Image: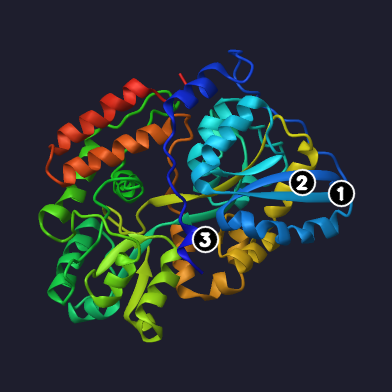
Amino acid sequence: MTRARYVRPVTAMLTCAALVLVGCGRDEEDDAPAAESEEVGSGPATGTIDVWAMGTEGELLGDFAKAFEQANPDADVNVTAVPWDSAHDKIINAITAGSTPDVSLIGTTWMGEFAESEGLEPTPEGLVDEQSFFPGAWDSTVVDDVSYGVPWYVETRVLYYRTDFAEQAGWSEPPRTWDELHQFATDLQGAGAEQGLYLQPGQTGSWQTFMPFAWQNGAALTNEEGTEYTLDSPEMAEALEYYKTYFTEGISQDALLVEGELEQGFADGKFGSFISGPWHVALVDEAGGPEFADKYDVTPLPGKDEAPGTSFIGGGNLGVFTDADNRDGAWKFVQWLSQPETQTDWYTTMGDLPAVRASWDSGELASDPRLSVFGEQLDNANSPPAVPTWEQVAAVIDADVEKAVKDAVSVEDAVADMQSQASSIGTGLE
């Protein structure tokens, strides 16, 4: 299990490409995307199903799909592995040119953009049971009250902490509230950690660490209709003020880490705790060696007033394109990948956490105490709004979080700038 399998890059949206795709549409029509999709035919899948998948998923899916081909002997799954760093633009270009594959892995934060462009087909009614998925995962497929895909795998963030430092500091149970987390991190420093809690101090992807605090405080990123950003709320400012205290009080550092520094620093005692996803279990175990497993644990994120607090949910969805040559076969392949037993087998093959709840009821996912914490957290996790311009606004939040924690601007000015820039960008759903 390596970082390469799990780290999902936050890809910056190219403004000009977005304007071409979202503003004009492939056929330059102003009509909204269709709200319904034809039913999928009965019987086995047939024909060639062209699939794009990114990273290690793309490298492993072809062999994994042989089980689908055995169950559907007249179908042929053709998987093309696409690098994550070029996937966003490759999909944009394919939608614009009308030369898409049948189905693709879609980053959760890309759903709004591609759905609004009319590039993705709405999920056929009855294809899967919405209630079988973690709610935050399903919500990431919904744009303007219509689902445009199916969750494939998920990840969320929890608190990693040194149990040996916690015990020395008198903590028999992990923190459950903001006040307790602040005291806990302070006490870990007193027990030997150089820094009590590592939090990302801005730059790409820092919104994924900061926004759980905002969500826990009742902040919303957009209005209910998704037509306006609402970043300048008192709840957002209060959460950022709390986040900033960890830096101003020396509990966390305001310098970014290089690859491998976090897990090694955690094993060496530099960091008493940090917030991250499931991929870090293997990385921490590797950095600390076999005896280190008894010196740390994971727990759901503390909430403002109780645990578990809301966390971030990410991962990957499966979308079928409106220009698919074999849309019937594509949806049947998506349906197969969504079955609990298939998701369990995919976890065994790849290590991606299943988006379907039932897959967590047996095997390693049910018996491993650390993995079960991630399952518990997934029941209380939010995704960013599925709006076309989210990637642009996420970059704004990243930059303003960094300015605030480094005292370049006040919290009030940082939140005001988030709102000003976001309002200028718009959600793309007006």
The residue that mark 1 highlights is: 44
**Left or right: 61 as drawn, with respect to 11:** right
Q: Which mark is nearer the camera, 2 or 3? A: 3
> Mark 2, residues whose alpha carbon is within 10 Å: few (<14), some, or many (≥20)?
many
Q: Which residue is drawn at 41% across and 36% down?
A: 391
Tell me the distance, in whole angstroms, between the alpha carbons under discs 2 and 3: 26 Å
Question: Is residue 356 placed above or below 373 in the rendered structure?
Answer: above
Q: In which quarter of the image is residue 408?
A: top left
- Report the disc number at residue 221: none
Q: Which residue is drawn at 81% across and 44% down?
A: 48
**Secondary structure state at the residue bearing disc 1:** loop
**Secondary structure state at the residue bearing disc 3:** helix
Q: Which residue is drawn at 67% across and 32% down?
A: 121
Question: Is residue 210 placed above or below 221 in the rendered structure?
Answer: below
Question: Is residue 387 placed above or below 199 in the rendered structure?
Answer: above
Q: Which of 23 and 347 is in front in this view?
A: 23
Amino acid type at circle 2 is Lys
Q: Which of 83 and 72 is in front in this view?
A: 83
**Secondary structure state at the residue bearing disc 2:** helix
Residue 428: give x, y in percent of width and height: 46, 23
Q: Are marks 3 and 1 in contact (CB under 8 Å)?
A: no
Tell me the distance, in whole angstroms, between the alpha carbons under discs 3 and 1: 31 Å
Q: Are marks 2 and 1 in contact (CB under 8 Å)?
A: yes
- Quadrant where the C terminus sits is top left
**Which of the two labelled residues, at mark 3 and mark 1, occupies the earlier sequence position?**
3
Q: Can residue 232 be seen in this view?
A: no
Q: Do the residues labelled 2 and 3 touch (CB within 8 Å)?
A: no
> Mark 3, residues whose alpha carbon is within 10 Å: few (<14), some, or many (≥20)?
some
> Mark 1, residues whose alpha carbon is within 10 Å: few (<14), some, or many (≥20)?
some
- Report the disc number at residue 332: 2
The residue that mark 3 highlights is: 5
Amino acid type at circle 1 is Pro
